[in-house]
Structures are given as structure tokens and as C-alpha cells.
Image (cartoon, helix red, strand yellow):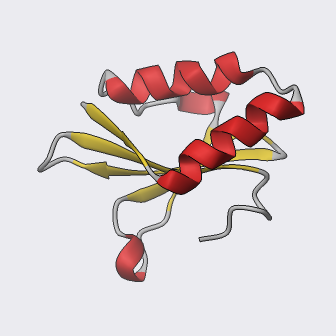
């Protein structure tokens, strides 16, 4: 699948890098999504956000204080990375 990054996501990614968090965990998730693997099992909590205009959006929790918001567009074969960071900071 094609990976597309929002401007917010790019900024969030830089903030996470500077914060000292292990960014490799996020990179692994992104690679898996790009490979079409969105079945994370019990390792991560993933919640669909299928309400209103947020159809096909998901929130994946890498940790209690770290989330990733992304959208899967099957028609375009694309994963759109929307936001990442502390859940209270990335409300959409």
C-alpha cells in the first residue's frame, strides 16, 4: 500500500523523535501498514473511528501515552498517516 503523510503527522513525528521515545516502534508499525498488514492482534489496541466523516480512520495505541491516527483507503490502495503523539494532543 502507498503511504501518505499529513503535514501534522510529519510535525508530530519530529516532536516524537526529539522527545527521546523509541521511534523504531512507530517505524515498524508504519512499515507493516505499508505492507498491507493492519492485523496487530493483542500487541496493540486499535479502535475504529467509523463515525461521521471519519469513516475508515483508526486509532492505534503504541503505549498508553502514544497513539497513531491513520486512514485506510482500499480503493486507492493507500494508508494515510494523520497524527501521532500523546492522545490528548492529537484529538481530531
Q: For the point 45% across and 52% down, which residue is it?
A: 6
Q: Quadrant of the N terminus?
A: top left
**View extreme (right): residue:** 20
> Where residue 89 sits in the image (x, y, percent)?
77, 62
Instruction: Compare residues 3 and 28 and report the one nearer the observer.
Output: 3
> Where residue 92 sits in the image (x, y, percent)?
59, 71
The part of the image, by quadrant, that contains residue 54 is bottom left
Residue 47 appears in the figure: no
Instruction: Compare residues 47 and 91 and report the one nearer the observer.
Output: 91
Q: For the point 78% across and 20% down, which residue is it?
A: 22
Residue 57 appears in the figure: yes
> Where residue 58 sits in the image (x, y, percent)?
48, 54
Instruction: Compare residues 4 and 38 and report the one nearer the observer.
Output: 4
Q: Does residue 80 appear left or right of residue 40 in this picture?
A: left
Q: For the point 43% across and 22% down, which residue is it?
A: 32
> Where residue 25 sits in the image (x, y, percent)?
67, 21
**View extreme (left): residue:** 75
- The count of marks equals 0
Q: For the point 56% across and 48% down, which residue is it?
A: 9
Q: Does residue 37 appear left or right of residue 26 in this picture?
A: left
Q: Does residue 57 appear left or right of residue 14 in this picture?
A: left
Is 89 above or below relative to 12? below
Amino acid at each position: 500500500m502507498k503511504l501518505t503523510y499529513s503535514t501534522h503527522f510529519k510535525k508530530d513525528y519530529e516532536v516524537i523523535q526529539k522527545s527521546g521515545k523509541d521511534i523504531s516502534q512507530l517505524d515498524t508499525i508504519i512499515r507493516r501498514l505499508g505492507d498491507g498488514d493492519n492485523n496487530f492482534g493483542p500487541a496493540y489496541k486499535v479502535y475504529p473511528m467509523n463515525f461521521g466523516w471519519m469513516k475508515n480512520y483508526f486509532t492505534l495505541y503504541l503505549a498508553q501515552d502514544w497513539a497513531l491516527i491513520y486512514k485506510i483507503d482500499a480503493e486507492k490502495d493507500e494508508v494515510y498517516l494523520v497524527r501521532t503523539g500523546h492522545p490528548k494532543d492529537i484529538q481530531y
